[in-house]
Amino acid sequence: MFRRKALSDLLANPPADEDLHGSHPGEHGLARHLTVRDLTSLGIAAVIGAGIFSTIGNASYDGGPAVSLLFVFTAIACAFSALCYAQFAATIPVSGSAYTYAYASFGELAAWIIGWALIMEYAVGNIVVAISWSDYFTGLLSGVGIELPLWLTMGTQSAYKGYHAVLELMQAGKPLADAAPDQLEAYKAWAAAPELFGGLRFVVDLPAFLITVLITSLVYVGIKESKNASNLLVLLKLAVVFVVIVVGVFYIKPANWSPFAPNGIGGVLKGVSAVFFAYIGFDAISTTAEECKNPQRDLPRAMIYALVICTVLYVIITLVLTGMVNYKELAVGDPLAYVFNKVGVEWLGGIVAVSAIFAMASVLLVFQIGQPRIWMTMSRDGLLPPVFARVHPKFRTPSFSTIVTGLFVGVPALLLNMDLVIDLTSIGTLFAFALVCGGILVIDPRGQSNARFKVPYINGRYLVPLILLAGAALVMVYNRENIDDFVRKVSFADGYEGFRHQIPMLVFLLASLLIAAISFRKQLSLLPVLGLLTNLYLMTQLGISNWVLFGGWLIIGLAIYFNYGIKHSKLNRAVPA
């Protein structure tokens, strides 16, 4: 379970379908088309998407204008991780992202766990984006006078749930006015839908399914076509974001920035999952390593470029939004369009609504590129069946894995309403980031690697304990109320129910002490340690319910590993030899 893959084996990198077809090395390898510009574009395509067009609104509602600082904090956390990703990408320029890096540093079991978590990150995240894209698209059609039947615009689960909620209201003798607008819409959709059998109705989110099919087809045809589409979409949405900033500046009222943090640090941190959901895309760049012309040089650069560009844009957009209208008005699904309609610039609100469709399509594109390449790499290692490693002889893309990815996203988007997936996706990503930072501490704890790019070494012997002490002091001074609440709940003042929600924070505090002690003893590199600590801290902010769901997902993955992967692993076959 803890056998590690040697760097020499990783760098040998046979073509994905060599074992299946007995081809000569390189015959059916992935096509190398990507430059640093294309990689940076892919990173921006993934990061500037659902976050800036939807989730930024709820985050601003919870934290006020101070959410702009949360973007900075999250970007710093991502920067530590990005540096570690960049060193791994320069050391191991092959597909697989954090899965491959974990295989080289922690061993096979950790690699499987992170690969399984990345499947959740990409697929479940894309389900949310597809459903959100559908909402924007149907709203746009409605705006131009084209009304699709309601039963073709929402998932079966959403319609069923809303229908029965309204039914219960009616049976209780309450007026329909008591029902929420989305419940009424779901009731109408279910009631008007064709009946199938046993009272079941044909209600599906057809636009969400069709956009997934379209994007999957593009990814299947080739990386060159995919990168051209991504570059075009990125240019379009960057132009829109630039126009939003330039026009919005003239409508800012500085009074809206006061109070800057109306709900304190707790309110700002409440938006962690929404903010971090916006950033999860930059790691998708590393899945395309085998399709880069010069991965060891270009991957590190592209990760840093994408992170810096997107952070600057997010901070400016947040300040513009919260300056144009009061933060209390921003709990809407389309905050950018809303603020311009609110100040009377309806033409720009319409442009934003249209551009959101393209922005979210580009997020779908990047994640649909990343997911099959992780499955392909896991299959190469024997942890998944060989068919997942098949590369199309003409298009030179992981063909079977791409089709499965399309079904894995399209079918749930057609039927389901995923309420917790943003948090669930964020916890999977943070877990991956933490393992990548920890991986650097395993393979290069003191910055002595000969990699083309490496994380700058700063001795953390004294700095890690000092930073943790300084952080604790600041929290005691500026967040005493939450500290007192934490102590009260840990002492079972609210019973087990109150205590269990503090378990992630307790684990983090113990981990921090352990990491500080190891840093002091081993003189570990400071930046990867800070990356590990910040990612672990952000994980504590996602709530125990998400940890339970994440644990359930990992249990399913471990069952597959112990029944298939551990027996078919190529390292397992190599040991007796």
Image (tube, rainbow, N blue to C red):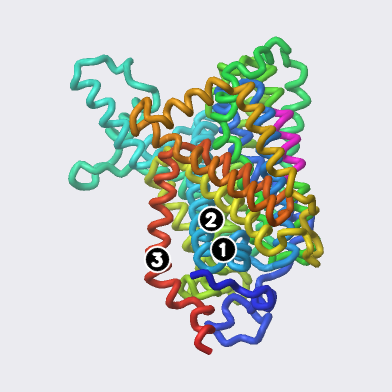
Q: Amino acid at mark 3?
A: Ile
Chief SS of the magenta region: helix
Crowd around label 2: few <14 · some 14–19 · many ≥20 (10 Å):
many
Of the numbered discs 2 and 3, the one sitting upstream in the chain is 2
Element type where label 3 sits in the image: helix
| Residue 94 against residue 134 in the figure, above or below | below
Determine the image quadrant of residue 513.
top right
Rendering quarter of residue 500 = top left
Q: Nearer the viewer, mark 3 or mark 1?
A: 3
Q: Which of the 4 quarters of the picture holds residue 457?
A: bottom right
Please report the residue visible at 61 percent of the width from the left and 51 percent of the height from the top. Answer: 433
Among the two numbered marks 1 and 2 on one chain, the one whose residue lies closer to the N terminus: 2
Range of magenta residues: 307-317
Task: Please state the horizontal and vertical placement of residue 396, each as a whole percent of the image.
Answer: 63, 71
Give the structural element (helix, strand or loop) at label 1.
helix
Residue 402 lies, in percent from the top left, at 53, 63
Give the labeled residue for mark 2.
118
Does 310 lie within the magenta span? yes
Which of the two residues, 372 or 483, is positioned nearer the viewer here?
A: 483
Could you tell me how far apart the alpha carbons at marks 2 and 3 are, in whole angstroms? 15 Å
Sequence-first tag of 3 and 1: 1
Pick the front one: 227 or 540: 540
Q: Position of residue 399 (x, y in %)?
A: 54, 69
Q: Amino acid at mark 2?
A: Leu
